[in-house]
Amino acid sequence: MPLRDWPIKRKLTAMLLLISGLVLLVTSAAFVTYQVVTFRQTTLKNLSTLGRVIAANSTASLAFADEADATEILSALRAEPHVVAAGLYDRDGRLFARYPLDLPGDALPAAPERDGYRFELGHVIGLEPVAEMGNPRLGTLYLKSDTKAVSRALWLSAAIGAVVTAVALLAAYVLAGLLQGWISQPILALAETARAVSTQQDYSARAPKLGEDELGALTDAFNQMLGRIEAQQYELQRYATELEQRVGERTHELEERNEELRRNAAKLLAANAELDAFAYSVSHDLRAPLRSIDGFSQVLLEDYRAQLDEAGQDSLRRVRAASQRMGTLIDDLLKLARVTRAEMRAERVDLSGMAQDIVAELQRTTPERPVECAIAPGLEARGDSRLLRVALENLLRNSWKYTGKQSHPQVEFTTVEANGDRVFVVRDNGAGFDMQYADKLFGVFQRLHSAAEFEGTGVGLATVRRIISRHGGRIWAEGAVDRGATFSFTL
Amino acid sequence: MAFLKAIAVLTSALALVQGSRAPEYQVKAVFLFNFAQFVEWHAPADAEARRAVVIGILGDDPFGAILDATLRGERLGARPFEVRRYRQWRDIDGCEILFISRSERDQIGEIVTGLRNRPILTVSDTDDFARRGGMIQLVTDKGRIRLRINLDAAQAANLTISSKLLRVAEIVRSSKR
């Protein structure tokens, strides 16, 4: 596991151990170094003391060339097992006596070197001048001691240092294990809480606070944050519930209203049908008495002309005109009703041909009118040919009629594309109308011109609209007074 | 230059004449010098301190130039050495060490008696010197020189001989006659 992924407990323990280990190591090294240096100095001092004693004792031996005595003095070195070799040199530098006796000749230097005590090649070497106090030098004592004592001291102090280090490290490990909790415990508690929060989405959890230090402050801040999140979540949930409830209410309301509308529509349809049936029967039933009124008025005018003065005859003529007009009205109304009730047959209809026929018929009935007609060729649609002929005839006849006061009357039947729909257009340059009343054009009995100006019953455009509606289309009008009118419809 | 050369030739010729005796007396000359280091005279300090240490030779001088050469430049503490030669023991004045030549072997008893109680370390290589009341006798044994010391004689002259010196010596007493 890479170091940075270690759990915080282990990191803390490792840190403490590393620091205390380093301190212990340095301390132990200092201890061992001090021990060794001290022991080396002591060793040198001891050897020099020994050297001085031996040298003082061997003055007479050298002065009076007594090798036996010198050898005996040197043999006292047996008491000091570290001394591995010793030699006495006379004042001319010749070897005079040696220790131990079986020492090979080359174990001692041929001649003494400079005086003093020193470490040399793993041994302690000592050269002590031999002289009777304050007197000329008699010779030199050579001592050679092994460094086993020094190395033993080194090993001993190293062992002590190692043991102390080990014990202290163990203690540090135990203490670190006990004390790292101070720091790791709050962090672990925090991490545990954070995990619980993120996995269970439980914002009501709170990290336990274990002290007033920075970690305590962190825990507080964390808990506050959790509290805020919890409050916000609660709020959000409340809003969501409220919203849902409101949507439910609105939906319910709308459904109710829809239901009401549906009911109303059905009612309206029923009423409309009833009204149509009523209008039809009324119109139908009205025709018989009307025909009687007209017929008997004709009888009066023809058979009793002599008994009637001019005023009476005129009145009767007016009665006839009025009843004939009423008959036309009734016919139109019946036509409208029929349009509404008629069966629909869908087929391909040649609108261009149909318009040509209608225009030809109009030209035949009023040859004196010089109307310029432009009918686009090849216009076709799908629908009921009988009803579409009624609608197209009404529109063209209207144009024909309202261009009556125009010196160069023009009528046009064509098609344009608008918003992807095919729109059929009947346009003229006639009397036109005020756009203010555009919505009234298609109402039954709604007329924008007087009968004296342009004759009509006010049922034609209503009939047209009903036919277009039954084909699922739409019709609308644009125009201006004396600028002509444009009727557009889709199918 | 020629003069110096003549002296050098002369001394080497002298050494050749003396032959085998030369190493023996060379050693004995060193011994005489060394005795001074191991013996205490207990003289009144002031008067003696500045004086030279006198090594006297009584009778025929067997050392020739050797003793003077050995002692040249040497000092005992601050005191230099001086060699004096005596014909008669009665001529001996201030003298620390007296070497009695073999030429005086017949008068040993007289000399030792005459010098008794005087702080003079008597040394000789005559036979039986120590037993006859001399202090230190140099004995040649198998080519080596051994010491024989009459401690009583030394003590009688109020001389203290270092224990170190005693250790390398054979201690004897005066023979009763």
Image: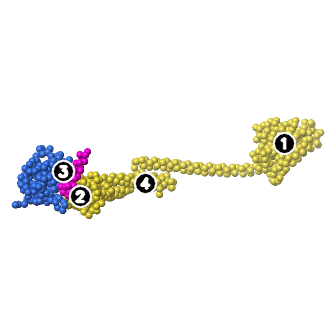
Instruction: Say which element carries label 2.
Output: strand
The three-letter code of the residue at mark 2 reads Phe
Colour that chain A carries in the picture: yellow
For the residues marked 1 and 3, what is the alpha-carbon distance in whole angstroms? 175 Å
| Hue used for the chain lettered B | blue
Mark 4: amino acid: Lys
Answer with mark 2 or mark 1, whichever residue precedes in sequence. 2
Q: Which residue is mark 4?
A: A11
**Chain of the residue under label 2:** A
Q: Which chain's residue wears label 3?
A: B
Discs 4, 1: same chain: yes
In the picture of the structure, the residue carrying the numbered disc 3 is B65
Residue A326: in sight, yes or no?
no
Residue B70: percent from the left, percent from the top?
Answer: 19, 51
In terms of image quadrants, where is residue A57?
bottom left
Q: Nearer the viewer, mark 2 or mark 3?
A: 3
* Chain under disc 4: A
Q: How much space separates mark 2 and mark 1, taking CA atoms?
A: 158 Å
Q: Position of residue A484 (x, y in %)?
A: 82, 38
Tag 1 residue: A412
